[in-house]
Image (cartoon, helix red, strand yellow):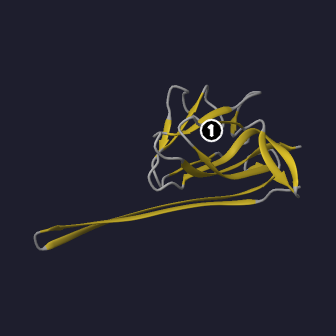
């Protein structure tokens, strides 16, 4: 198994204001891209895990060291020891997705006291080009839940990182 990924994010915005007879315009563009090849060095990774999921307000716990998957029709476990790319997209129209970790980890590379709230239709993405990525210990658990008890929340998740599949 070898991995190759092309990470591309592009943002473009234009703001126009009319001030009397003069119109002022300001444009901003941010482009980010890099190619990930197979390996453990900077700009490299070994495994990919993706899933479309549904959670309610009781939530679920995902452990990056033991992600359930199906490979070639058989059950498998993906063990990600360091994340190079993480994308979480809330596909719900009405529900906020809430993510909390016990410690800084693959899921949220900031203090555990902070909960990430992804609003309906929102996206959270983080990318590390260095060799270390977002490394973590034997467990890397995240509590993922719908913020409101009235509706389930659907989301998509993609993780590219160092690790193995068994």
Q: Nearer the viewer, residue 128 or 85?
A: 85
Q: Nearer the viewer, residue 113 or 91?
A: 91
Could you say where residue 143 lies in the image, as x and y percent from the top left?
60, 34
Could you say where residue 114 lies in the image, as x and y percent from the top left?
49, 30
Q: In the picture shown, does residue 9 fall above or below 163?
A: below
Could you say where residue 7 lies in the image, as x and y percent from the top left?
65, 59
Residue tagged 1: 107
Q: Residues within 10 Å of mark 1 (few under 14, many from 20)?
A: many
Of the 4 image quadrants, the one containing the N terminus is bottom right
Q: In this view, which residue lies farthest toward the front?
A: 150
Residue at image point 61% right, 50% down:
87
Q: Nearer the viewer, residue 91 or 139?
A: 91
Could you say where residue 150 lies in the image, as x and y percent from the top left?
46, 43
Q: Is residue 46 visible?
A: no
The quarter of the picture where residue 112 lies is top right
Q: In the picture shown, does residue 74 fall above or below 13?
A: above
Kind of element beneath mark 1: loop
Q: In the picture shown, does residue 8 fall above or below 110?
A: below
* Residue 57 falls left or right of residue 76: left
Residue at image point 59% right, 37% down:
59
* Residue 148 falls left or right of residue 129: left
Residue at image point 77% right, 27% down:
138
Of the 4 image quadrants, the one containing the C terminus is top right
């Amino acid at each position: 198994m070898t991995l190759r990924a092309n990470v591309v994010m592009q943002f473009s915005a234009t703001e126009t204001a009319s001030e009397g007879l003069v119109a002022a315009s300001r444009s901003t563009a941010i482009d980010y891209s890099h190619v990930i090849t197979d390996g453990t060095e900077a700009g490299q990774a070994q495994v990919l895990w993706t899933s479309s999921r549904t959670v309610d307000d009781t939530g679920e716990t995902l452990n990056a060291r033991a992600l359930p998957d199906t490979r070639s029709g058989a059950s498998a476990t993906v063990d990600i020891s360091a994340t190079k790319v993480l994308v979480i997209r809330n596909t719900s129209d009405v529900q906020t997705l809430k993510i909390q970790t016990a410690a800084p980890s693959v899921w949220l590379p900031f203090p555990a006291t902070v909960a990430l709230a992804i609003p309906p239709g929102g996206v959270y993405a983080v990318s590390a080009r260095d060799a270390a990525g977002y490394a973590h210990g034997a467990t890397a658990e995240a509590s993922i839940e719908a913020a409101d008890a009235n509706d389930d929340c659907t989301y998509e998740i993609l993780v590219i990182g160092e690790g193995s599949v068994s």
